[in-house]
Image: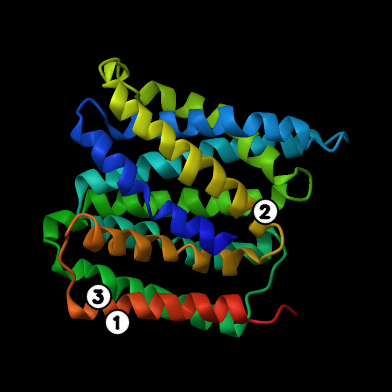
Amino acid sequence: MIAAAAAAWGTWSLFFRPAEARGGVDAPLEVFVVFGVILITTAPLAIREHPGVQRPLGAWALLGLQGVFDAANALLFFWAMQRTTLAVAVLTHYLAPVLVALGAPMMVGERVGRRTALALAVALAGLAVLLEPWSASADALGVGALLGAGSAVFFACSLLAAKRLGRHFVPSEILAWHMPTALVTILPFVSLEALSAPPGALALLGLAGVGPGAVAGVLFIRGLACTPASRAAILLLLEPVVAVGLGVAVFHERLRPAALVGGAMVLAAAAAVITERPR
């Protein structure tokens, strides 16, 4: 389920690029519409699956904080892509698995095994070969890289929070009820001009909110409930591999032969994680 969710998140470009081509769409609006659709589509499921038990106030507070983490992660990542190359933005954003591996023992009481640590190293090396960040100019490695690294911090915090919240909430509740604080966090960054975006662009963003947003989100959190956080973070590296593949297949972007080796390294690391027997 986690691998399927990561692959679905790799298809964002199929919705965002056509929407942006219609004009009037910026990063905060994209995040706000997608998160809003996720809330609308998953709230009925969360209400139906409500276990009917009281949860501690601290769990609700962490759920609200996760919304802030998610919003900050998305905004910083989109801004990173605007300030630097896609390669630098994605590579710094996907420092998150390292942070998850470091934080998992303290936050959720999980130990990181040798096979997981090796798979993490191979996956990150493969991602670097795939994206070739060294081909970026020196100017692209400044603020944009810092924004990408900042998004990695919040992404790791969001993943670890979701893992911890699984002790108190069902997956649909986690996905739905952290959205209100996320939307409140994003709203100040949405310009009035963006609200007049073409209906066709908003419809594409709405579809993104249903598919890669709500459906993939529920799959991810359900899978996370029975998967160590560090292994789940490695599987999320499938997202940029799928995104690059779609760039070649759909948008006719050029891919160097070395990038194929990098993509194969990421896939091999993901396969090693998936096939590892649980302790």
| Amino acid at circle 2 | Arg
Is residue 4 left or right of 222 when viewed as pictured?
A: left
For image coordinates 15% across by 66% down, the residue present is 254
Q: Which mark is residue 225?
A: none
Quarter occupied by residue 89:
bottom left
Looking at the image, tell me whether mark 2 or mark 1 is earlier in sequence order. 2
**Label 2 CA crowd tier, 10 Å (few <14, some 14–19, many 20+):** some
Is residue 244 left or right of 1 when viewed as pictured?
A: left
Per the image, the residue denoted by label 3 is 259
| C-beta proximity under 8 Å, tags 2 and 3 | no
| C-beta proximity under 8 Å, tags 2 and 1 | no
Q: Position of residue 206 (x, y in %)?
A: 42, 31
Q: Position of residue 91 (x, y in %)?
A: 33, 63
**Label 1 CA crowd tier, 10 Å (few <14, some 14–19, many 20+):** some
Q: Position of residue 161 (x, y in %)?
A: 63, 49
Quarter occupied by residue 46:
top right
Quarter occupied by residue 61:
top right
Per the image, the residue denoted by label 1 is 261
| Amino acid at circle 1 | Val
Is residue 162 left or right of 124 when viewed as pictured?
A: right
Q: Is residue 231 above or below residue 73?
A: below
Per the image, the residue denoted by label 2 is 222
